[in-house]
Structures are given as structure tokens and as C-alpha cells.
Image (cartoon, helix red, strand yellow):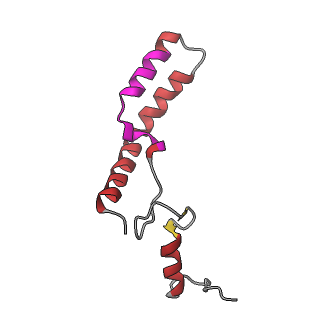
Amino acid sequence: MAKKAMIEREKKRQKLVEQYAAKRAALKEIANDESRPMEDRFKARLKLAELPRNSSPTRLHNRCQLTGRPKAYYRKLKMSRIALRDLASNGQIPGMVKSSW
């Protein structure tokens, strides 16, 4: 089980990313537009830099929804391999059985 603080920090980052997504997209569009004057593009870059760092989507990290584990994460299932194996062993995932040979 991951620390509660790490899980809460990730939730806070997710909230900030959603809050600033539109503003960040608009500023990026201005900054990357070659037809605009260099001065406007530079101002857009400065405003982009003033936004909170945690509002950037690259700072998000996928975590298991059951345990909060950050590693060995399956995107399709939104859980870690360990949580997946536990659920499969308990028979809580239809059609999935523990392999043996």
C-alpha cells in the first residue's frame, strides 16, 4: 500500500491539470504559432511559465486504484499487477484463472 500522502498528492495534481488545461492549451497555441509576432509568442511563454508546475500533465503518474502502487501498472485495467493477481486468485475477475503447467 502506498503512502496516503503520495496518493493525495497525485489527486491534487490531477485536479490542477484539469483546472488549467484550457488556459495551458490556449497559451501553447499562441506560443507555437509561427504567424504571430515574436513578442506575443514570448509573452505567452512567460505566462505559461507562471502557471503552477503541477498543472502540467507530464507530472502525473499512473497509480493503482486499489493500492496506490506506482509501478507495474496496467493502463487498460487501471491497477497494478499485484492487485490484478490477487483479484484473479480470489475469482473476482470473470474469465481469468491462475495459470499452472
Q: Is residue 35 above or below residue 7?
A: above
Q: Position of residue 80 (x, y in %)?
A: 50, 68
The N terminus lies in which quarter of the figure? bottom left
As drawn, the residue found furthest toward the left would be 5
Q: Nearer the viewer, residue 34 or 45?
A: 45
For the point 61% across and 83% down, the residue is: 96
Q: Residue furthest right?
A: 101
In percent of the image, x 61 and y 86: which residue is there? 97
Above or below for 6 versus 45? below
Residue 69, horizontal then vertical, whole percent: 43, 64
**Is 34 or 84 nearer to us in this picture?**
84
Q: Residue furthest front?
A: 101
* Direction from residue 3 to residue 75 in the image, left or right: right
The residue sitting at 41% across, 21% down in the picture is 46
Q: Main secondary structure of the magenta part?
A: helix
Indicate the position of residue 27 as horizontal and vertical percent values.
46, 27
97 in relation to 18, above or below = below
Name which residue lies at 50% across and 65% down: 78
Residue 50 quadrant? top left
Picture coordinates of residue 19 (x, y %)?
37, 42
Q: Which residues are magenta?
A: 41-58
The relative height of residue 67 versus residue 11 in the rendered view (above or below) is below
Between 39 and 36, which is closer to the camera in this rendering? Answer: 39
In the image, residue 12 lies in the stretch drawn in magenta: no
> In the displayed structure, does residue 1 sit left or right of residue 82?
left
Position of 85 compared to 15: left or right? right
The quarter of the image holding the C terminus is bottom right
